[in-house]
Image (cartoon, grey):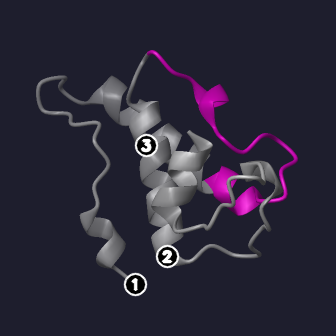
Amino acid sequence: MASWLSDQMGISSDASVPFRQTPSMDTLTWDQFVKTHDAGRFVGALYEFGAWMCPWPPGTDEPEHRKAWLAGFAVGRFARQRMDPETFDPKPVDSRSSRG
């Protein structure tokens, strides 16, 4: 999942270097935040998975990514529990990435 997420966020990854060893960023751009948040929201909306699916472990060099992902996870889990199952769509919403 980490390599998929790095591709979605536009983080270049060298095949010979594990994802966790790529250089960290001090801050997230709006698009990176939205994509990370949406990925967390998608996982949070699925009951089969938990917060342990976060690709950034505690103590990571990229705490902004972890916070954005966990915030999205909380939104997805809350929405899944509170919304009507027929109307809730767990698919991430890409239209928000144009804000900024």
| Image location (x, y in percent) of residue 86 | 11, 25
Provide the residue span drawn in magenta: 48-67
The answer to whether residue 51 is left or right of residue 9 is right
Using residue 84 as the reference point, say whether residue 42 is left or right of it.
Answer: right
The part of the image, by quadrant, that contains residue 57 is top right
Residue at 56 percent of width and 77 percent of height = 29
Q: Residue furthest left?
A: 86
Q: Residue at x 39, y 24 (%)?
A: 46
Residue at 84% of width from left, 58% of height from top? 61
Which residue, given by chain and number where applicable, does mark 1 sit on? 100
The tally of labels here is 3
Residue 30 vs residue 67: left or right?
left
Asked which secondary structure carries label 2, the reply is helix
Comparing 4 with 54, the one in front is: 4
Residue shown at 24% from the left, 66% from the top: 95
x and y, in percent, of residue 39 in the image: 46, 46
The residue that mark 3 highlights is 41
